[in-house]
Image (spheres, rainbow, N blue to C red):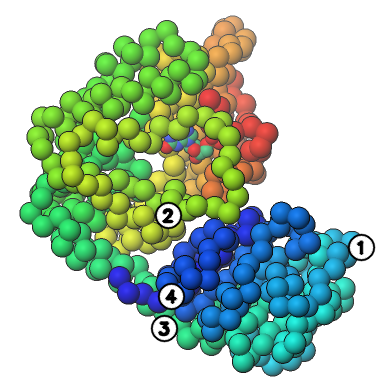
Amino acid sequence: MDHQKVLVLDFGGQYNQLIARRVRDLGVYCDLKPCDMSAMEIEKYAPIGIIFTGGPNSVYDENAPRIPPQILRLGIPVLGICYGAQLIAYTLGGKVVRAAKSEYGKRDVSFVRQSPLSEDIPVRSVCWMSHTDLVTELPAGFGTLANTESCPVAAFGDPVRKIYGVQFHPEVAHTEYGNGMLRNFLYRVCGARGDWTMRNFVEEQIAALREKIKDGRVLCAMSGGVDSAVAATLVHWAVGDRLVCVFVDHGLHRKNEPEEVMSVFRDGLGMNLVKADAAEEFLGALEGISDPEQKRRVIGEMFIRVFEREAKKIGKVDFLVQGTIYPDVIESGKGKSAVIKSHHNVGGLPDVVDFREIVEPLRDLFKDEVRRVGAELGLPDRIIWRQPCPGPALAIRIMGDVTREKLAIVRDADAIFREEIARAGLEREIWQYFAVLTDSKTVGVQGDFRTYENVIALRAITSVDAMTADWARIPFDVLERVSNRITNEVKHANRVVYDITSKPPSTIEWE
Ligand code: XMP
């Protein structure tokens, strides 16, 4: 693929992936890379432009990430954002100082000088600021482009070297014309052509997959989730029947999920899709186990065992498809975080399947791009917009041990919650929503009789990347309908509670 490329150097700020997504949305391919890339590596990568992200440091911190000045002499256009802007000023001999007060929030920014960056942007507009340090003196050759009441240099640049810095964050939605400024940088400063579109991607990927796979055989573990569905569909378009997909029915899925996967992919798309019915085995292996981590471990191991068995039936394959996406492969500028839960993402499959090579057709894509590719390939909205479901599925939404009876309760309650969210038109606003079967029983009164039954908890969150989340402010009348329906229609449930904790301190799933 010889697309034009932009390099986003990650200095550890919280909006870094957002910057990369914005650039791609503007039709230019970009990669997010750690900030210690050398000038030589950058030259070899050959970007049409470089963006330095924000970051938590001050340029004067002892361990602050810095850059070799050669990077600014490569003749490649540069845009520094927040810390990235301060770093440009500092590296080239300007002055950065610590302000008495941090500036945080929306500010009126005035452009005071014409530049390609502010073309078609109003002279005065609202921008999002979040900083303590600020640039007070510019290096030789640079001019102030914009200011705010408390920030004398809100944007600066040198049109000759094509190096620019902005103290505010153009990537966040609160910056009214941020997208326009990024577009200006890409198209007016870097000379972008806009050759990154999902249609191009699909055409190129299908050609590349055909070239790679030739007449080989391919195997894919299909979970029904967006990533594996889109990856499998791409490969199916490329090589048709030479792709065999296996869907493991572990008996822990949400209501109607296995049927839907079979109907969309086997009946609809004509995919060579095998369903492995393994509910009995999974439930047997889970019997009496109530520790969350142990449940996850057992399910992960069982999944691999069942898949291995199915793969043996299929015989030798040449390739294994995985739905890895870009956020899974980004090496961030920050350190690795602690393991809170052992996620089960079919990670162990490569060890048990006999194959030559892994195929990861979505490795370069962000989630929103995966969805757009899915739409290009004609997948239905209910697959493309399916909310994420953890590998262990309902097993970690039942507190304590997993039984058929408990699965029936949580499955029915969950289906009602999903129906009502869809009816209220809230599906795309709420990132994830589901029912949990707690291990509490409470007293109730139903039809004049005392009951002593289970408590269902509803969890609904808004999020961007599942790293942090807030509880969704679902209208009370929707919650009321869900609660009425669950207590009326689901056997063995007499109380419904709503989870109002954010992540952190809670996690999204209860286990
Ligand atoms: P937590 O509960 O850690 O969840 O806040 C973050 C996101 O990850 C999903 N999740 C999983 N996904 N395998 C997965 O593929 C798993 O084992 C798993 N556990 C949690 C969770 O649904 C949420 O979207």
User: According to the image, label 1 marks what residue?
Assistant: 100
Q: Which numbered mark, 4 or 3, is in the foreground of this view?
A: 4
**Other residues around mark 2 within 10 Å, as few (<14) / some (14–19) / many (≥20):** some
Q: Amino acid at mark 2?
A: Tyr
Drawn side of residue 220 relative to residue 426, left or right: left
| Mark 4 vs ligand 1: CB below 8 Å | no
Which of 58/495 is in front? Answer: 58
Instruction: Say which element carries label 3.
Output: loop
Earlier in the chain: of badge 4 and badge 3, it is 4
Q: Quadrant of residue 90?
A: bottom right
Instruction: Give the label, 4 or 1, closer to the camera.
Output: 4
User: Which residue lies under the disc numbered 3?
Assistant: 193
Q: Where is residue 493 drawn, in percent x and y?
A: 52, 18
Q: In the drawing, does residue 329 fall left or right of residue 243? A: right
Rounded to the nearest angstrom, the CA distance separating label 2 from label 4 is 20 Å
Q: Report how far apart the C-alphas of labels 4 and 1 lie in the structure.
A: 40 Å
The residue depicted at 10 percent of the width and 38 percent of the height is 316
Q: Is mark 2 within 8 Å of ligand 1?
A: no
Of the two numbered discs 3 and 1 on the same chain, state the one appearing first in sequence.
1
| Badge 4 element | loop
| Residue carrying label 4 | 46
Discs 1, 2 touching: Cβ within 8 Å? no
Q: Are marks 2 and 3 in contact (CB under 8 Å)?
A: no
